[in-house]
Structure formats: C-alpha cells, structure tokens
Image (cartoon, rainbow, N blue to C red):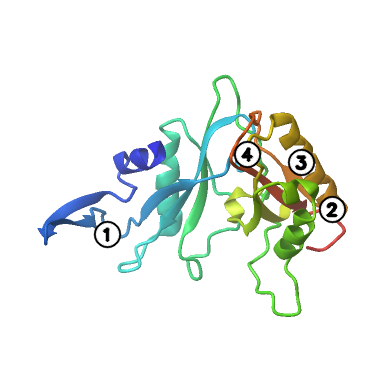
Amino acid sequence: MVVNYDLDQLRVGENRVVVGRRDGFDIQDRDIAPGDGWCRALYAPECAWPRGADLCVRVQWFPDREVGSDSDARLEAVTTGLRSLDYVVERAGRPFDPEQDLEANLLVYRMEPGKTPPQRSDDAWAYVQPPRTYKWPEISPRELIERWMRKAKAARTGNNLVVWDTESALWPPEASFCTHVRWWPAPDTSSAEIYEGLREFASIVQDADYRTRLQERPIPDAVETVDLLVYREADSTTPA
C-alpha cells in the first residue's frame, strides 16, 4: 500500500528492520525513536471515501507504551508529514483519548486532479457516541439493520449480506451512528440490477430514518461485492 510506504519514508510508519536470524528466518523489529509511536495505513471501503477522492485509507497511530508519547505533538508530526506529500489528513471520528484508547485514527486521502477537498466543520464528528455494549434482550442498531436488509429481495437472491460496526473515522460527518454493509450479489448481476437492489436497501432503512452512502464511481456489471454505509444523521428524531 502506497501510504504505508510513504509513512516509512517519513519515519513515522512501522519501519521494520531485520535485526538478526533464527532457524533460517529473519528477526524483525521496529526502528523507531523512543516516544514517537508508529503508524500503519488500513483499507477504507470506497463508500466511505470523501467525494472527489481517488485514494483513501484509515491511518492508525499507536503511542509508545514503554516511554510514553506526546499524542498531540506526534499526531501533528504525522499530519504535517503526510500533508507535505499532498495528502489530505483529517482527525476524523471520535476524539482520541490517550488515557483510554489504544490508538488514534486519521482519515488520509488524495483528491482527483482538479477537485478540492470537502469543507468539514471542526465539530463534524461531535455526534459520535462512545461504544456501548448491548445485553439481551436488547438488540443493537447494527443487528436491526441486518435483520431488515436480509428481508430484501436483493439480499435473498444474492449470495450473502453482512453488516459490521465500523471505525468512526469512516463515518460521514454529522452522523450519530453508522454501519458498514457488504453485499454479495448473485454472479453476473448487471449494474442496473445492482443499483435496483441498492435502492431497495435504501428504501427499507429510510423508514427508520437511516440513510445509505455508496461509492462515487459507477458500479460495473458482475462485481463480486458491493459496500455501502448505513447511517443516521445527528438531527434525526429517532434514537439509534
């Protein structure tokens, strides 16, 4: 992944080096200055990309747990370094709490030529709630959404449908709840039929004040999987 390469070149990535060999295998360690912590870039589904982006990842930063890290200073160093390589960097999602969180998350992307980054307000992710545990007989919003969507004709005639919780850095701005849905259409399903299925999904969840978000690029015929976000905006009157 190109962003992981760039993180290593900036000396803020995993920076793995071979420090020896044992039983015919390389022994690796991270070549990182004390206190710096380290970063890695992870896949972001295209439905979560900002409009106009042609590349997008979620970057995790892990503080140095042995000697401690100045999280604000280190995140600023990572942000500055990536921006010097023409990436857009946002501290998206729930704010990082160094006392409780194991890692911080950044949304890192590049825009298509001629496109400008979307304007986000400083409090765009202020509505993200701390994670909570649902106990029987409670049903989580994610489980409800999966139940509803599995009843759709598109889900019943497709190969599979899964709904996951998703990292808040990938949530649309102003969302108060969000899940990541992956749908496996039947083999050789046409683009028109795929979009018909997606409209059916959107119709089902909108009755409960949820919205869907698709990738910006057109979905071609016979794709193996389709990703979408199902989310609720913070001004919705129905609680998640």
**Which residue is pictured at 41% across the width and 39% down the height?**
3
Q: Nearer the viewer, residue 220 or 47?
A: 220
Among numbered discs 2 and 3, the one appearing first in the sequence = 3
Q: Nearer the viewer, residue 5 or 159?
A: 159
| Disc sitting over residue 197 in the figure | 3
Q: If you read the primary sequence from the N terminus, does the residue marked by circle 1 or circle 2 appear first? A: 1
Q: Is residue 172 visible?
A: no
- Amino acid of disc 4: Pro
User: At label 3, which amino acid type do we have?
Assistant: Gly
Residue 101, percent across and down?
50, 66
Q: Amino acid at mark 1?
A: Pro
Q: Secondary structure at mark 4?
A: loop
Q: Position of residue 166 (x, y in %)?
A: 60, 56
Give the left or right position of residue 221, taking residue 103 as reference. Answer: right
Q: Which residue is mark 1?
A: 34
Residue that appears at 31% across and 69% down: 66
Counting residues from the start of the chain, the first of labels 4 and 1 encountered is: 1
Relative height, residue 65 to residue 182 (above, below): below
Number of numbered labels in the structure image: 4
Residue where numbered disc 2 is placed: 209
Quadrant showing the C terminus: bottom right
Residue linked to disc 4: 187
Q: Callout 2: helix, strand or loop?
A: loop
Any part of residue 32 in sight: yes
